[in-house]
Amino acid sequence: MEKINYEYDILDIPSDTKYWFVRANSRAEYYDDFKLNNYIAVDANSILLSTLLDIPQTLRSSNDALRERYKQLFQENALERFNKRIQSEKMSDKTRKKEQASELKRSAYRSGIVYHFVEDMNIGDFIVIPYNRAKKFLIGTIVSNCFENEIDHIEDLDENGESNYAISPFKLKRRVLWIKELPKNKFPDKLSWIESAHQSIFNITKYGNELNPYIAPIYRYKEKTYARIGVNTKDKISSSSWLEYQLTLKEILGDDLDKVFQKQYVQSPGQIILFVEQHWWLIPIIWSCLFGDVKYSNMGFEGRFQGVFKYFSKDGKRERKLDLEEKQARINNMNADSVNKLNSNSEESIKLKDKIIKSISNSMDKDEKTKKINKRFTNKVEKKNINISEDAQNVDKNKLQKDFKLSNENPGVSIQFESQKDNLIPSEDVSEKEVKKEEKGSEK
């Protein structure tokens, strides 16, 4: 039986993943609502989702034409509402022209927000929502197509029977699996500018790999495998300490040192990002030597590259907890295949997958979206046996810990899948078209 000493779950992020910054209204008014009820929403100014989805394919073949059609629909709607308003309000020609121009400008801006929400966002994209004054950030991943029917909201009442949190009135929604809350002092420095940005929704994909180390400590993205090492010392780090760190990596990796690259963000405290282009197992070797207890010259490493929904689902986490049982089964020469079968029987993941696929059942590009969804439920296993040098086995971690206070922590507060399951796998958030289809079917 193949010897496996160390098993690592590695988040596998598809290269087509987008990253979005979404405000929960002004002063994060709906932050708690979005968090507690697993969704995000935008205001469509009474324009129905069916109106947007029914835009003909001839316009959808061009992004510019589709954007322009959105703008046209929103401005026509704004003018219609404005004309009704001026019938009941007395207004000078000058004021009317000024107000009309403002309405058209606002509606054009609103059309851009809704366009992003309906057309640009995809299942599996990452979402970042700031709290009031950016004191913390909510990070999650989209798990549904856009829909507009009502959802149930968790009841949280004060002594007067009033809700303790504001409920969003916005009609267009998407379900979100929340991953964690990240405090401001852990948020990537290169993304600090978004605190002062005024847009309700904007694409931050070009900064995606600045955010990834805070989503998972070890991950694969665009054919590279990364790991985040926390540097928690508040003291200045001397040149001799940096030399000691580099020499330690040399002891661990030997001739493979030049296959590992680094980015250092050390403002005391800070982080070191390690990455490799092909030799994924070098990351677990470093991890094991710095944070584990390497006792053998020949080591077996297993990397389980998991899609985002698999990684953050209840079953993905349950499988990680069963690692010890798998190891014990191998040690006792038991049939480990039975344990593996138990691990792969991911009932919650299957339910979540079925729910997500159901939400796209009426999409014109259903087949393409289904492929993307399946990619985010993958669990690919790769194995590698490595001869660990005596230097690597005897590496002195104490000096590094004293100078750097290194850690393999996963920053922020994780949000457990179990607490979100009832929202993510309910029966009520099917798309409006599905509801109408079911109603028509029952009438026949």
Image: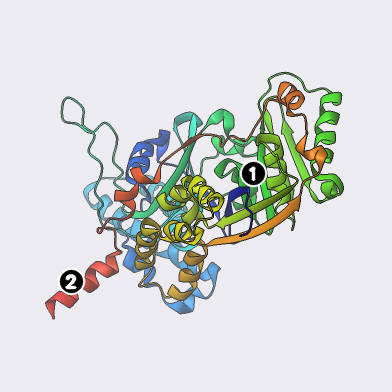
- Mark identifier at residue 2: none
Q: Mark 2: few, some, or many residues within 10 Å (few <14, many ≥20)?
A: few
- Identify which residue, 359 or 373, lies in the foreground: 373
- Side of 400 relative to 189 (left or right): right
Q: Tell me the residue at 68%/25% (across/down).
A: 405
- Identify which residue, 405 or 423, lies in the foreground: 405
- Identify which residue, 150 or 125, lies in the foreground: 125
- Residue closest to the far bottom: 444
Q: Say what secondary structure mark 2 lies in.
A: helix
Q: Which residue is mark 2?
A: 439
Q: Residue 25's x, y, as percent?
A: 40, 40
Q: Which quarter of the rendered picture does the N terminus lie within?
A: bottom right
- Residue 27 position by quadrant: top left
Q: Which quarter of the rendered picture does the C terminus lie within?
A: bottom left
> Taking the image as drawn, is residue 127 in sight?
no
- Residue closest to the far top: 235
Q: Is residue 270 above or below residue 1?
A: above
Q: The residue under label 2 is which amino acid type?
A: Glu
- Side of 209 relative to 68 (left or right): right
Q: Which residue is mark 1?
A: 210
Which sits earlier in the primary sequence, circle 1 or circle 2? 1
Q: Residue 23's x, y, as percent?
A: 45, 42
Q: Tell me the residue at 40%/60% (across/down).
A: 345
Q: Residue 367's x, y, as percent?
A: 46, 75
Real-space CA distance between mark 1 and mark 2, rounded to the nearest whole angstrom? 46 Å
